[in-house]
Image (cartoon, rainbow, N blue to C red):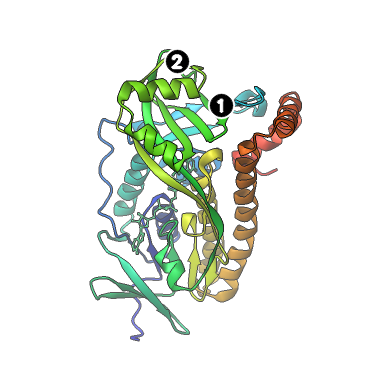
């Protein structure tokens, strides 16, 4: 292995998490290269991306520190000020309002493509070496560096490799790190619809026996559907004609926003819980979905990933100021210890919620209804839950 270094840090995967960590580290003065198997993100254009995420204030704050949040806001993001969650089986409901926290909003609905695009523009300006359509196929480590091998036969050497290469993370697999979790046997059907009643800047979520259905407010007045369904049901929904599909969503959402019209294409994503057994290996750290893929019912996947970014950058920033090796095993172990315990707690809580709401036995439904009704009138506890979801310190 040659001793020449191509960068201090190479980030593999330029999704929202990989792009954010590459930008944050470049801003700290590290020489960073970012590579992704996919082509570069395209400009957001006029039609809203089918894939959106609910971003917590902690994520918006990180993106604001990186200077990209104002760019996203200027394009189009939709603040949501309230959340209404209800259980089809028990009829019980829970409401969260920004007023509970003296906040302007609980979070924002943002298109994935828009976020990736603003991050990419900032990366270009920051002078980060960007390699799109470049697939990592393996890596190797020695005492003072690590090498990532590329599909075109080239390789890059750095002090530290960061794997942000998604739920099926090839780098994680190559490092021999296993995952714990389960296949939900569900797919999340996504689409944008126009509703007869305004979305009222509220995130609506109904728990149904087959999985949760969410209607999230979009900047142009439409709502974004995220409907987790057993595989066969999801396939059936995708095959329905537009009117029957919109009617099915209306029935499943109890027509809370009135009749609906489909106003986009449809897509579906397989759902799996996948928690990496370790977040670190020699000169390698995992972050984002490569470390933890969670059920979308809590809208937290990328928010957890951006908390990984914050933690890693705090540690790497301190290492740089002290002139220490960014790939030092003690530093990576500290990152892994802190983030894995927090991410595991969240991943298993979302999993427990998915299991709880799937149960339909009468006594469980009754107990669940009682619990939700009790929580509805306990503002202090609701405030704690909302603070956690928003990424605020407890
Ligand atoms: C239906 C649905 C709804 C969701 N809603 C929310 C929500 O409301 N809020 C929220 O916080 N999260 C949500 N999530 C989760 C969120 O989308 C993910 O957590 C997030 O996209 C993960 O980002 P990432 O950058 O870690 O990984 P990814 O977005 O998967 O990016 C990984 C990147 O790595 C690249 N890559 C892979 N292999 C290689 C290789 N060998 N070499 C080079 N590059 C490679 C890929 O091309 C890709 O660009 C949702 C997910 C789904 C499915």
Which quarter of the rendered picture does the N terminus lie within? Answer: bottom left
**Residue at left 35%, top 38%?**
267
Answer whether residue 314 is visible to the viewer in this image: yes
> Which percent across, then down, holds residue 391?
60, 43
Q: Is residue 219 above or below residue 348?
A: above
Of residue 139 and residue 245, the one placed in the foreground of this image is 245
- Helix or strand or loop: what does disc 1 sit on? loop
Residue 313's mark?
A: none
**What whole-number distance in Å separates the C-alpha atoms at marks 2 and 1?**
19 Å
352 or 312, nearer to the observer: 352
Of labels 2 and 1, earlier in sequence is: 1
Reading the image, the residue beneath label 1 is 104
Circle 2 residues within 10 Å: few <14, some 14–19, many ≥20: some
> What residue is at 54 percent from the left and 75 percent from the top?
328
Say whether mark 1 is within 8 Å of ligand 1: no
Q: Residue furthest left?
A: 152
Looking at the image, which residue is at 33% across and 20% down?
Answer: 243
- How packed is label 1: few (under 14 Cα within 10 Å), some, or many (20 or more)? few
Q: Is residue 261 above or below residue 216?
A: above
Q: How many marks?
A: 2
Q: Which residue is mark 2?
A: 198
Quadrant position of the C terminus in the picture: top right
Query: Visible in this render: residue 67?
Result: no
Apparent side of residue 70 relative to residue 96 in the rendered image (left or right): left
């Amino acid at each position: 292995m040659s001793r020449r270094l191509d960068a201090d840090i190479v980030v593999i995967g330029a999704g929202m998490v990989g792009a954010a960590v590459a930008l944050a580290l470049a801003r700290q003065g590290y020489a960073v290269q970012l590579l992704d198997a996919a082509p570069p993100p395209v400009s957001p254009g006029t039609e809203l991306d089918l894939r959106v995420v609910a971003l917590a204030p902690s994520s918006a704050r990180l993106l604001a520190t990186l200077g990209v949040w104002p760019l996203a806001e200027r394009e189009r993001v939709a603040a949501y000020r309230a959340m209404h969650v209800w259980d089809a089986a028990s009829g019980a409901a829970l409401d969260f309002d920004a007023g509970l926290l003296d906040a302007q909003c609980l979070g924002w609905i943002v298109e994935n493509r828009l976020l990736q695009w603003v991050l990419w523009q900032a990366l270009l300006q920051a002078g980060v070496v960007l390699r799109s359509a470049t697939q990592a196929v393996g890596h190797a480590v020695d005492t003072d560096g690590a090498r990532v091998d590329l599909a075109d036969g080239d390789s890059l050497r750095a002090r530290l490799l960061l794997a942000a290469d998604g739920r099926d993370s090839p780098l994680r697999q190559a490092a021999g790190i296993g995952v714990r979790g389960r296949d939900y046997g569900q797919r999340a059907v996504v689409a944008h619809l126009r509703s007869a009643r305004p979305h009222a800047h509220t995130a609506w979520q109904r728990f149904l026996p087959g999985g949760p259905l969410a209607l999230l407010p979009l900047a142009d007045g439409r709502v974004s559907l995220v409907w987790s369904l057993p595989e066969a049901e999801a396939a059936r929904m995708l095959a329905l004609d537009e009117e029957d599909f919109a009617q099915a969503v209306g029935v499943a959402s109890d027509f809370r926003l009135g009749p609906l019209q489909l106003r986009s294409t449809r897509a579906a994503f397989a759902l799996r819980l996948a928690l990496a057994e370790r977040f670190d290996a020699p000169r390698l750290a995992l972050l984002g979905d490569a470390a933890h893929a969670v059920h979308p019912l809590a809208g937290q996947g990328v928010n957890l990933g951006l908390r990984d970014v914050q933690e890693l950058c705090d540690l790497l920033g301190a290492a740089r100021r002290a002139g220490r090796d960014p790939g030092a095993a003690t530093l990576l172990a500290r990152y892994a210890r802190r983030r894995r315990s927090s991410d595991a707690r969240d991943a298993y809580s979302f999993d427990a919620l998915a299991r709880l709401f799937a149960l339909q036995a009468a006594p469980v439904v009754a107990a669940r209804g009682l619990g939700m009704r009790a929580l509805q009138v306990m503002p202090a506890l609701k405030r704690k839950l909302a603070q956690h979801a928003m990424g605020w310190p407890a």
